[in-house]
Amino acid sequence: MEKRIAVYPGSFNPFTVGHKNILDRALKLFDDVYVVFTANSSKSNEIDYDLRQKQIFKLNTIPHVHACTRDTLTVDSCKQFGANFIVRGLRDTSDFEYEKNTARVNEILSPDMQTVFILPKPMYDNVSSSMVRELKKYNVDASQFVF
Ligand code: ADP
């Protein structure tokens, strides 16, 4: 049977325990998951590149996980990695509105592409990269939320 390969794209600035929960759940559905750290022009471009490199390294130690950065459209990353699925996490209705739109556009760009939405465990509903960045800005230890 053909391998089921998914791309899990995101700004991941930084990759949080919430993102990790989605990844763990995706690994139960797919043979291989490519975690693609993307540049999101509408979001903060203040990136801690040291942390990003460490997170990519750590993710690559997990079996069946391949982590990298890409500055391309998600559908192009999918083609490169031979993936037919895009994984996205859904925390709430505002995630849903945004994600639905993106999924529709991706399906127009690449009709074979299917987006799979995964709910996190409830305890991760309130974890976000922006919250981590905000805490760090005020020198509050945010390590419990960071992968
Ligand atoms: P993007 O800029 O692409 O939205 P993010 O890093 O903010 O990147 O999020 C990547 C994906 O992970 C999105 O699908 C987002 O909804 C999801 N996500 C973010 N935080 C959580 C969380 N705590 N639980 C579940 N999914 C999450």
Image (cartoon, grey):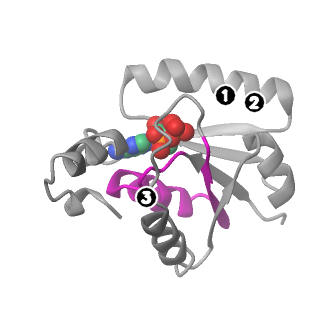
Q: Which residue is drawn at 23% across and 51% down?
A: 136
**Label disc, if present, on residue 106 of the rendered structure:** 2
| Secondary structure under the numbered disc 2 in the rendered image | helix
Q: Do the residues labelled 1 and 2 touch (CB within 8 Å)?
A: yes
Q: Quadrant of ligand 1?
A: top left
| Secondary structure under the numbered disc 1 in the rendered image | helix
Mark positioned earlier in the residue sequence (3 or 2): 3
Residue 92 in picture, x, y percent from top left: 36, 27
Mark positioned earlier in the residue sequence (1 or 3): 3
Residue at which label 3 appears: 48
Q: Are marks 1 and 3 in contact (CB under 8 Å)?
A: no
- Residue 129, relative to residue 26: is it above or below? above
**Label disc, if present, on residue 49 of the rendered structure:** none
Does residue 121 appear to the left or right of 43 in the view shown? left
| Secondary structure under the numbered disc 3 in the rendered image | loop
Residue at which label 1 appears: 103
Q: Residue at x 31, y 60 (%)?
A: 146
